[in-house]
Amino acid sequence: MLKEYGIAGIEAGGHGGAKALPLFQLLPAVLAAVPEDGPLVLAAGGVATGAQIALFLTLGASGVVLGTRFLFTHESAYSAARKDVLVQAGLNATARGLMFDEVGRTMGWPDGIDGRAIANGIWRDHDEGLDLDERLRRFDEGGARGESERLVIWAGMGVGLTDKIQSAEEVVRELRWDALLALQRTSILLGQHDNHA
């Protein structure tokens, strides 16, 4: 029976460990603890490009899991309003915390678990110290008016590396091609090193 461990760094969107390590540190630590003939280790968290896939495969991951990257697809269940926000998101567009669950009324997560989402009006209201009743009022009123400023939009830190909506097939093809190019560049560098040794 095939077994695998999925590990998510702090960069991951949605819910996860509030104090998780960055994937770049977490993956080598997990791989060092897993026997060579042990389960597959799948890396996740903030991965949005083929070059990042190549990086984590080179570090020893058996595979890479992408979540946010596939929100930028026609097939994603996210609404057009949420996708518009994602496309406009920059590199520092996300934040972690329970403020998104508080206003979304989705509390009840175990201790140490919170979520990463687009840092919009929900995050700013919390950051400004508004009490929960006022934050709920603003969230509900914004939703009633159809505003995107206070939508809960779960997304990982890789959100700012993508700026268009494509088909899932196009995304897979692009990621595969970019990962192969990155791995080829690595092979060329190794070959050049061997020639000079």
Image (cartoon, grey):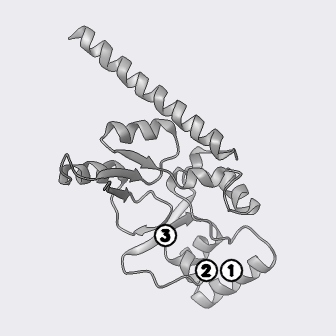
> Which three-letter amino acid code belongs to the residue tagged 3?
Gly
Residue at 36% x, 57% y: name it: 7
The alpha-carbon separation of the residues under discs 1 and 3 comes to: 17 Å
Please provide percent x and percent y for residue 181: 48, 26
Residue at 51% x, 54% y: name it: 157
Looking at the picture, tell me which residue is in the foreground, 103 or 179: 179
Please provide percent x and percent y for residue 53: 44, 40
Q: Kindly report which numbered mark, 1 or 3, lies closer to the viewer in this rendering.
A: 3
Could one spot residue 129 in this view of the protein? no
Q: Kindly report which numbered mark, 1 or 2, lies closer to the viewer in this rendering.
A: 2
Name the image quarter holding the C terminus: top left
> Which three-letter amino acid code belongs to the residue tagged 2?
Gly
| Position of residue 119 in the picture relative to residue 193 (left or right) | right
**In the image, is residue 50 above or below residue 76?**
above
Residue at 47% x, 33% y: name it: 179
**In the image, is residue 185 above or below residue 115?**
above
- How many residues crowd mark 3 within 10 Å: few (<14), some (14–19), many (20+)? many
Q: Which residue is mark 2?
A: 104
The alpha-carbon separation of the residues under discs 1 and 2 comes to: 8 Å
- How many residues crowd mark 1 within 10 Å: few (<14), some (14–19), many (20+)? many
Label 1 or label 3, whichever comes before in sequence order = 3
